[in-house]
Amino acid sequence: MKYIKQPLSIQLQIDKLKSRGLIFDDEKIAVDYLSNISYYRLRAYTYPFQDNTDEDNDHHFIRNDIHFKDIIDLYCFDRRLRSLIFNAIEKIEVAIRTKIVYEYAIATQDSHWFMNEDLYRDNYENIIEDMGGEVDRSNEDFIKHYDQKYNDPDFPPAWMTLEVLSFGTLSRMFSFLDSKSDPNKKIAKEFGLPNSFILENWMHSLSVLRNCCAHHSRIWNRRFPVGLKLPYNTSYPFIGRETIKTIHNNKLFASLSCIKYILDIISPQSDFKKNLISIIQDGGNLLKIKDMGFPENWAYLDVWKEK
């Protein structure tokens, strides 16, 4: 099938949304919004409230009480939530990176331990290639200084090399390390997790979520491709065994719970829950937190209780 849709002026965009049942209280304000937030980007927030099965492709709103402002409120909620999550994951990423570098460097007494193939269980050549690419692309002064002063080894030491890796590459590297090694098990234990496979899974999932936030993708009402492994035998308060069975591990609440769990360890004074509640309260008329996997009693689960 050939794509034949034509570009629409902002006024035609408004007219189309009106014809589908969206209410505009002030079209001038709507023009201002649509001049800065694309019609197609907002489609991600109108879609769940439209009939997307009709053969004529009219996408009429299934409710007759939805205003353009309601859609903007939902969009702004998602934007503020992305910002909160992105900042939280930054703290978590830095903490995990620090522990990986430190525990392996101390255990091996080797500044370049990550180049030791014996420490990996799989994919050594691939991860070294990926790491090399990221080091080569780095503009950090400490990388340039190493290259100017040293030529052996090719890589800078772990505390430089791992510092410039993306969270995704760091996550893959950790997943390829031997999970039975002492530093690997010690890192998981420092986060109160029963084994490093849980931490690997959390790192992978949070790196995907972080990328969604960094690229301004919708996180509200989204199912994520990496389901989270939710342990019941953690060293710190998390979620009870029976409750875990009811949690959708590919929805946002599961990720938020893992973020809160780690923040409680690395940043006990964090205002993450307080800020999350504030963002939810200002979410607008269309926000239903169950769409993100929140259970009704979420604020009373162990990880979310006031300490």
Image (spheres, rainbow, N blue to C red):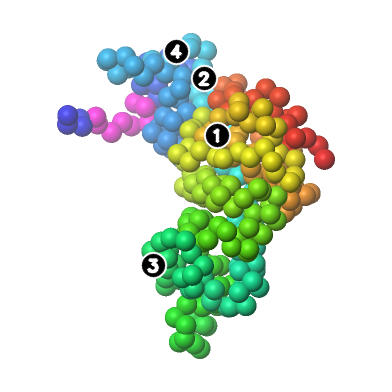
Q: Which quadrant is home to the C terminus?
A: top right
Instruction: Calculate the distance from the C-alpha at mark 4 to the C-alpha at mark 2.
Output: 13 Å
Q: Is residue 51 above or below residue 113?
A: above
Instruction: Judge by depth and name the residue closer to the eye, 3 or 290.
Output: 290
Residue 225 occupies quadrant: top left
Residue 65 colored magenta?
A: no
Q: Which quadrant is home to the N terminus?
A: top left
Span highlighted in magenta in the image? 5-13
Disc nearer the start of the sequence (3/4): 4
Q: Label 4 neighbourhood size at 10 Å, few (<14), some (14-19), many (20+)? A: some
Mark sitting on residue 300? none
- Residue found at x 52% / y 19%: 67
Residue 82 occupies quadrant: top right
Instruction: Calculate the distance from the C-alpha at mark 1 to the C-alpha at mark 2.
Output: 32 Å
Instruction: Calculate the distance from the C-alpha at mark 4 to the C-alpha at mark 1.
Output: 29 Å
* Amino acid type, label 1: Asn
* Amino acid type, label 4: Ile
Q: Position of residue 279 (x, y in %)?
A: 66, 34
Residue 12 colored magenta?
A: yes
Disc nearer the start of the sequence (2/3): 2
Q: Secondary structure at mark 1?
A: loop
Residue topped by disc 3: 125
Decide if residue 228 is in sight here. Answer: yes
Residue topped by disc 2: 67
